Amino acid sequence: MTTIADAIAALETGELIHLPTETVYGLGARADAPAAVAKVFEAKGRPKFNPLIVHVASLEAAELIGIFDDRARALARAFWPGPLTLVVPVRDTAKVCDLARAGLDSVAIRVPAHPVALAILQGFGGGVVAPSANRSGRPSPTRFQDAVSETGPSVAASVDGGDCQVGLESTVVSVLNDVRYLRPGAITRAQIEAIAGALAEDASEGHRSPGRLSLHYAPDAPVEINIDNPPMDCVYLAFGDTDFTGPVLNLSPTRDLSEAAANLFTCLRKADALKPARICVAPIPADGLGEAINDRLKRAAGFVG
Ligand code: TXA
Ligand code: MG
């Protein structure tokens, strides 16, 4: 079995690891070594203009990499360790190579709330870049086996941390001139505003996080969303009761948004494995965590340009 010590050793020698986090499984590499970071882009088939998130064990470690003002520090104190990524001005470009930042003068940083991730990060000491461990464009892995089947051959050490509790990638918030909500996640807009005050208006889609590609999180079968009356040739992802008589996977029988988020990518994979003509998804409420779920679903359906 692969241990935490194996993962630390692999990072030290510039190899890739599977990093279990509370959001999704990450594909990790040391952030300071361009050759190691290049392996991440190659293993995922990821466009190089899309910068990566640097994972560290604590706010103290984060402050060595990025510049935290009072707003950023307050957000970090409120939500770290946890599913929030903060984009701040970069402090030390040697600790996070240009390739990891896609040449930007800002850097995305997060302290994950998973004991295995924290043990690896503490043991390694430096920053670890980790995008989701899927190949680019595909659903993020939320189970150990899915991470291994997506990117296993490229990885030197895969640590099994169980199923991911949150199931959606972290919320991304930039704290530069203004505070902006760049990617919805389990930390909601309202939770950010309660700490940092009113958010700046959303930029248009194209100007948000550079990596927000149009077709993302997508299984092989086409995805249709907001479907109340599914056709017989689909696999239906229900939310609450359904009287559909075809194949059904339920995101949450009790209409619980946290449960639906945790099940979303696994259900997309299970539905895809049945090789249907299409995957239809029930309407999901847009409030709270529903914003993040609907964001991922729209991208899986190819609706966001
Ligand atoms: O939950 C997560 O965040 C997972 C786990 C493994 O921690 N990681 C993850 O990484 O989702 P990734 O690479 O798939 O998403 C990184 C997001 C992208 O949308 C990227 O464009 C944005 O963060 N990002 C990174 N650096 C940025 C920067 N300097 N400015 C704006 N957005 C940035
Ligand atoms: Mg991803």
Image: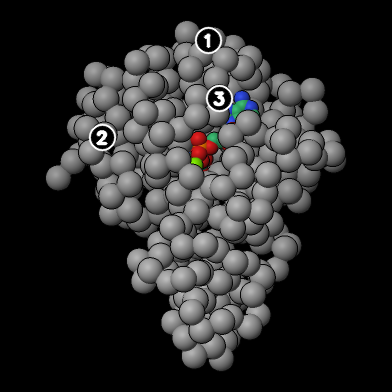
Query: Is the C-beta separation of discs 1 and 3 under 8 Å?
Result: no
The label shown at residue 222 is none
x and y, in percent, of residue 255 in the image: 60, 76
Determine if residue 38 is in view: yes
Q: On the image, numbered disc 1 is attached to which residue?
A: 93
Q: Which amino acid lies under the numbered mark 1 shown in the image of this protein?
A: Thr
Image point 74% across, 23% down: which residue?
176
Label at residue 49: 3
Q: Are marks 2 and 1 in contact (CB under 8 Å)?
A: no
Q: Is residue 280 above or below residue 76?
A: below
- Kindly state the secondary structure of the residue where label 3 is placed: loop
Q: Which mark is residue 155?
A: 2
Is residue 33 rendered to the left or right of residue 179? left
Q: Quadrant of residue 50?
A: top right
Are the residues tagged 2 and 3 within 8 Å (C-beta)?
no
Residue 82 image point, x, y percent = 53, 43
Of tags 2 and 1, which is closer to the observer? 2
Kind of residue at badge 2: Val
What crowding class fits label 3: few (fewer than 14 Cα within 10 Å), some (14-19), or many (20 or more)?
A: some
Residue 296 place in picture, x, y as percent: 59, 54
Please state if 221 lies on the left or on the right of 227 as rendered: left
Ligand 1 within 8 Å of disc 2? The answer is no
* Some atom of ligand 1 lies within 8 Å of the CB belonging to the residue at label 3: no
Disc 3 marks which amino acid?
Phe
Q: Where residue 265 sits: x, y (%)?
A: 46, 59
- Residue situated in front as seen by the camera: 188 or 17: 17
Measured in 3D between alpha carbons, the distance from the residue under mark 2 to the one under mark 1, in whole angstroms, is 26 Å
Q: As rendered, which of 51 and 184 lies closer to the eye?
A: 51
